[in-house]
Amino acid sequence: MALQIADCRDIAPERLCFAVNDTFSDYVVPLTMTESQFVDFQRQRGFSPEHSFVALDGDRIAGFWFSSEPLKSYGNRGYTLSVGTSPQFRRQGISRHLFLAVSKALNVAGASGMQLEVVTSNPNAVATYEAFGFDKIRNLGVFKLPKRNVKTPENQADGVRIEVAENLPSDTEDFFDALPTPQNSRAAVDGLKPNTCIVLAKWDDSLIGWGAVYADGAVAQIAVRRDMRRQGVGRLLLAELANQISSDQFMFVNVDENAASLNGFLTRVGAEQVLSQFEMQKTFAAA
């Protein structure tokens, strides 16, 4: 039976979740998401059913390419949430058919291109994306930190207080050294409310930092104002985040290797890098 390429508007999350688990079932550590976890995954990463496609073998999903709509905050590019092909259907060119369908839908929507992350230790995937016209833009690290290792600093800035907040601050100019990847963006944090925790650091009523963590312990953002770094503010934020979540460890996903201050902070608090990824982008040709 010939495979049919279709968008995801009429496909229930339950079926898509099953396809994801099936696709990654033969990995060294198989992925097993519940439907609830998959829905959170969709909300966090901006899943758009109109711009996401599956390859169907009858009623079975043989492969998928999940995408967001064009994101203004990321150069009007569509963000690829996940790509996969079921083990029985690999090496049949399915990913190319899905890529063509997604890129066409994004082009029609006025997107300037696409972006994604891929593990650096998967050369076949990297080569596939390069064949599709993606270029490596930056290197990203993934770190883990056991919560038991997080300590409140003894030498902290006088007068700093930490408070729980409903929303992320809007002004990031004096805080970020690198743009978070889409899964850690403001939209992602907002999309997973109320299953996120945000804490602010203030000094004399002035905002000097913040942290945001998802319920599973993945730290979406941690930022300290440039003139207040190396004074224990980041450690104070982490300590309060540790008090707010039940997970026994933090994960810092997609840390730009050029964000020297953040990487230095993670080293000082004892975080261990466990993975490296490339951020890759494709630019669509002008019409």
Image (cartoon, grey):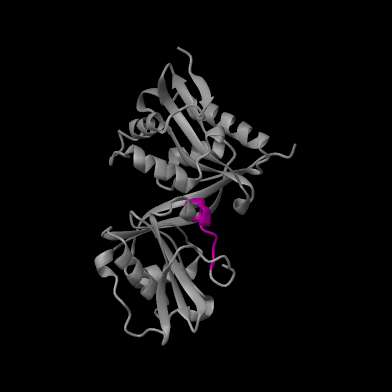
Image position of 182 with respect to 204: above or below: above
What residue do we see at 30% from left, 33% from top? 26
Q: How many marks?
A: 0
Image position of 219 with respect to 125: above or below: below
226 relative position to 112: left or right: left
Image position of 119 with respect to 89: above or below: below
Viewer-closest of 177 and 243: 243
Q: Which residue lies furthest to the right in this view?
A: 287
| Quadrant hosting residue 62 | top left
Viewer-closest of 208 and 143: 208
Q: Does the magenta stretch include residue 30?
A: no
97 relative position to 40: left or right: right
Quadrant for the N terminus in the image? top left
Which residues make up the magenta segment? 176-187
Where residue 237 sits: x, y (%)?
Answer: 39, 71
Where residue 267 sits: x, y (%)?
Answer: 37, 69
What residue do we see at 31% from left, 37% from top? 27
Quadrant for the C terminus in the image? top right
Q: Which residue lies furthest to the top in this view?
A: 1
What residue do we see at 51% from left, 41% from top? 80
| Quadrant hosting residue 266 | bottom left
What residue do we see at 43% from left, 48% from top? 120
Where residue 37 sits: x, y (%)?
Answer: 35, 43
Where residue 28 sits: x, y (%)?
Answer: 28, 40
